[in-house]
């Protein structure tokens, strides 16, 4: 199977604190990979290193065989890697549709072309399709800031998929979402994976969500990978149990 | 060579004064995210408090100077924080920045209209005799300025490192959230920062006005010197502000002697551009983590 | 939302009003005497100031940066135009050259400054402002130094001299209208959306592929180019330029006027420019105190209405349309799975 993302010996220290201590793994095309671990195990730091928000202290990251370590996040995004953040980050002043247009406009044509082209960069149809897919249809023209938390979460995810990314890294997509919405979200993510073959890596604390969504799980504790395998195998792994109980 | 040494000493003297302004500026930024564009005017104004005391209240200079320091701490510390910074910080950083720019204009034109548009001679705290030090002729006033400024800096550094309040202030500057959890009265620490800035500005004012003459337009040059010093030294470090101030002072004085007077002002600006281009974290600053 | 034709109709009305404002209409039976030469001059000055303010608004209100050098860019534009027209080159060429020069300098200035911390652009533009003023003052062979450049001619259009105040006003109005349209187009385009995104949440924008640094640099360069264009119009308007209007002080005033007018709103720069040009006239009795009053006005406005006069008007309009401000969220249904 082809590896979309290859992480080799990535480490990150802040002053005296080693948040991530030499982590290596591959992410294969089309899979939904879960990344779990107790609080403070370095999951978000690892994501930020992969995605360019932080500069890793050492290590190499490759997407489709191409080194992307230290690449600026916007450039990485245009190569086909998208993300969501732990803290919800939509643009409250823009409408739902505008948020989605924004999420893909930088992938359309040249910058200069966008200046003289149509106002929506030709993305209204795509945005509407995404809105329909995530069942936000009646909210298309509402300001994103006026949506409920769960709806904003759906929008956030939708924005990450707007540009048809090869690889999406979702940071706690289920946090703060009610049960009904959660089922909706999981089903939508599985649908995208099925229909487009997009690869995901998902950080989550909600065990049920991640175990039922992901085909493979990595477990991080104190900055290191301590286990890897199917959800069942990981659930029974004594090292994993200890890592969680020990905290 | 002796000329060069004289220039160095003069440069260090003015540099130490710039350092005082730069330290206050840096402390304000660290403690409360306040970029005080009126810092130059803060250094210009106290001298006029003293002059007003002497002219309108017939006070002797020493009393007027003390009055000036007290008034500065009140007006530029307490009032500044209560009337301008606190209400505006709630609105965001940009409105606050704009307000300090407006405040700078207010103080500058206020002094010009209320007191005078003319440059005013300002009495020296220290006698202006020339002595011979290791064969080099230096002005006693300059040595005195250097000594007083360095003493102030030393006292401040000791206060920040060795006293409980000082360490609390440092903790607040580094991480207000954690400091609050640890029981530090963050609001009071921030207030102290404003008071210290006002006091430093007053000291700087009393030391620099004999050299530059007290003029309403001094704020521009002094402010620019403070900003350049803070950035050159490394924006988030007090030690950086000290180093930056001394560097700017020395370079400014050397430029006055060796570069044409009409472009003298440009030299610290070139220094600023060079630092931003080649060492943006400043001489003593730490490299910032890239956030975006 | 407002009906689609209303803003367009208002704009047309405004333009018609502006065209006719200085004209004596009594000959047509309308009891309006128009403006004399000085009034027309003030109106023209307002337009020129508004163009510069639009540039600052792009940088500050839309891209969320700070510029303390707009007057310096006006200076670059003014001196470029003055020197080129005095050398016999056509005004149109000088005008474009002025904007281009300002744009290029903006890129050169912004590129290193934006690599680092956010507020560094403010300090770099502060230093640049002082530097430009020094160059203008010192390089007498080029700029005439403190004596400046006198007798700058107003251009001619197809043989018609634009020297009369009214003709030059209409000429400026036409150019300002084109520049305003260009700004409106820019802000409506995907670039405008990118600017909004990078102002509201640069980290999220970056993660969506928006090259935050690149767009910020473009906003700064375009905004500064507008300063250059304004300077190009300023030179023939006042017919004599010296270093004074291009110093640091005036740069700060451009920043203040945009904020007073309403940073980030389209009408803001026009309102702010109006206040800046008219306030010295109204406060003529207060002489030197007008700057103090202006400064206090700014501080009060920042404390109570940081969205400026435009923001205040918007709030008033919103109040009249919907007296009870409701939170819309609870009214939305949860979508069925």
Image: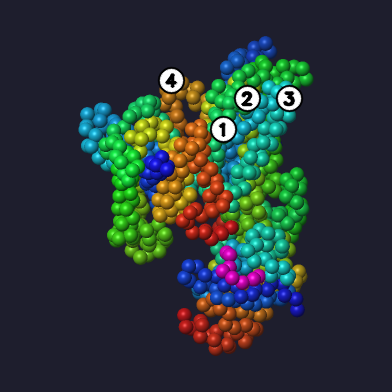
User: What is the number of the mark on residue C235?
Assistant: 2
Of residues A159 and C210, the one drawn nearer to the viewer in this rendering: C210
Q: Disc 4 or 1, which lies upstream in sequence?
A: 1
Identified at 45% across, 29% down, the residue is C291
Q: Are marks 4 and 1 on the same chain?
A: yes
Q: Which residue is mark 4?
A: C285
Which residue does the image show at 69% across and 68% down from the upper left?
A: A67
Q: Write the start and end of the magenta stretch as one range.
A: A54-61
Q: How many marks?
A: 4
- The residue that appears at 61% across and 72% down in the rendered structure is A59
Give the mark nearer the N terminus: 2 vs 4: 2
From this viewpoint, is residue A224 visible?
yes
- What residue is pinned by disc 3? C89
Residue to which mark 1 is pinned: C135
Going from N to C along the chain, the mark reached first, 3 or 1, is 3
Which element carries disc 2, helix, strand or loop? helix
- Same chain for labels 3 and 1? Say yes or no: yes
Name which of mark 3 and mark 4 comes first in the sequence: 3
């Amino acid at each position: 199977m082809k590896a979309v993302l290859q992480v080799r010996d990535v480490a990150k220290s802040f002053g005296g604190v080693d948040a991530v201590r030499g982590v290596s793994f591959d992410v294969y095309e089309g899979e939904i990979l879960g990344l779990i671990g107790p609080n403070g195990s370095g999951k978000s730091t690892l994501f930020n290193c992969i995605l360019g928000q932080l500069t890793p202290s050492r290590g190499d990251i490759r997407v489709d065989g191409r080194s992307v370590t230290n690449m600026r996040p916007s450039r990485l995004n245009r190569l086909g890697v998208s993300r969501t953040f732990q803290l919800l980050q939509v643009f409250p002043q823009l409408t739902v549709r505008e948020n989605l247009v924004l999420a893909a406009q930088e992938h359309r044509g040249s910058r200069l072309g966008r200046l003289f082209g149509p106002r929506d960069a030709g993305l209204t149809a795509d945005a509407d399709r995404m809105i329909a897919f995530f069942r936000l249809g009646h909210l298309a023209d509402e300001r994103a800031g006026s949506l409920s938390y769960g709806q904003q979460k759906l929008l956030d995810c939708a924005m990450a998929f707007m540009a048809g990314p090869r690889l999406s890294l979702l940071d706690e997509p289920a946090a703060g979402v009610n049960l009904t919405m959660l089922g909706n979200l999981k089903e939508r993510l599985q649908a995208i994976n099925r229909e487009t073959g997009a690869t995901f890596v998902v950080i989550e604390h909600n065990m049920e969500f991640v175990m039922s969504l992901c085909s493979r799980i990595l477990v991080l504790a104190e900055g290191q990978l301590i286990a890897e395998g199917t959800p069942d195998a990981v659930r029974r792994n004594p090292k994993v149990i200890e890592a969680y109980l020990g905290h | 060579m002796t000329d060069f040494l004289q220039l160095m000493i003069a440069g260090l003297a003015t540099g130490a004064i710039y350092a005082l302004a730069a330290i206050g500026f840096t402390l304000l930024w660290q403690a409360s995210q306040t970029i005080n564009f009126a810092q130059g005017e803060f250094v210009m104004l106290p001298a006029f408090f003293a002059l007003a005391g002497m002219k309108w209240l017939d006070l002797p200079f020493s009393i007027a100077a003390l009055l000036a320091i007290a008034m500065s701490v009140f007006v530029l510390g307490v009032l500044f924080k209560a009337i301008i910074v606190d209400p505006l910080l709630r609105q965001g950083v940009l409105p606050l920045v704009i307000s300090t720019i407006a405040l700078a204009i207010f103080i500058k034109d206020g002094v010009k209209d209320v007191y005078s548009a003319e440059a005013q001679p300002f009495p020296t705290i220290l006698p202006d005799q020339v002595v011979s030090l290791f064969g080099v002729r230096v002005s006693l006033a300059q040595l005195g300025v250097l000594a007083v400024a360095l003493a102030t800096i030393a006292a401040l550094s000791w206060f920040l490192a060795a006293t409980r309040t000082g360490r609390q202030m440092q903790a607040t500057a580094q991480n207000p959230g954690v400091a609050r959890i640890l029981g530090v009265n963050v609001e009071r620490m921030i207030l102290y920062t404003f008071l210290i800035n006002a006091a430093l500005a007053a000291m700087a004012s009393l030391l620099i006005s004999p050299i530059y003459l007290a003029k309403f337009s001094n704020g521009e040059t002094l402010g620019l010197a403070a900003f350049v010093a803070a950035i050159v030294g490394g924006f988030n470090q007090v030690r950086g502000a000290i180093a930056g101030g001394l560097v700017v002072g020395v370079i400014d004085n050397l430029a006055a002697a060796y570069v044409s007077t009409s472009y003298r002002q440009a030299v610290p600006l070139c220094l600023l551009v060079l630092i931003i281009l080649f060492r943006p974290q400043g001489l003593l600053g730490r490299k910032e983590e890239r956030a975006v | 939302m407002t009906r689609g034709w209303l803003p367009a109709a208002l704009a047309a009305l405004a333009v018609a009003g502006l065209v006719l404002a200085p004209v004596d209409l009594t000959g047509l039976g309308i009891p309006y005497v128009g403006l004399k030469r000085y009034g027309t001059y003030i109106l023209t000055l307002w337009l020129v100031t508004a163009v510069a303010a639009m540039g600052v608004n792009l940088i500050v209100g839309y891209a969320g940066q700070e510029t303390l050098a707009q007057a310096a860019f006006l200076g670059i534009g003014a001196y470029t135009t003055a020197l080129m027209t005095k050398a016999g080159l056509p005004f149109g060429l000088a005008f474009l050259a002025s904007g281009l020069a300002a744009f290029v300098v903006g890129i050169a200035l912004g590129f290193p400054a934006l690599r680092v911390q956010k507020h560094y652009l403010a300090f770099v533009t502060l230093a640049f402002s002082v530097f430009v003023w020094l160059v203008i003052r010192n390089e007498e062979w080029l700029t005439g130094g403190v004596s400046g450049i006198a007798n700058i001619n107003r251009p001619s259009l197809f043989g018609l001299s634009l020297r009369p105040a009214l003709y030059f006003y209409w000429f400026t109005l036409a150019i300002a209208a084109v520049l305003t349209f260009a700004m409106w187009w820019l802000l409506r385009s995907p670039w405008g959306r990118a600017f909004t995104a990078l102002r509201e949440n640069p980290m999220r924008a970056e993660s969506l592929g928006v090259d935050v640094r690149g767009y910020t640099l473009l906003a700064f360069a375009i905004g500064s180019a507008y300063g250059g264009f304004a300077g190009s119009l300023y030179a023939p308007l006042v017919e004599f330029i010296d270093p004074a209007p291009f110093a640091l002080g005036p740069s700060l005033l451009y920043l203040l006027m945009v904020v007073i007018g309403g940073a980030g709103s389209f009408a803001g720069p026009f309102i702010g420019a109006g206040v800046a040009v008219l306030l010295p006239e109204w406060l003529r009795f207060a002489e030197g105190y007008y700057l103090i009053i202006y400064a206090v006005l700014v501080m009060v406005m920042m404390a109570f209405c940081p969205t400026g006069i435009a923001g205040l008007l918007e709030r008033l309009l919103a109040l009249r349309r919907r007296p009870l401000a409701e939170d819309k969220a609870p009214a939305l249904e949860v979508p069925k799975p």
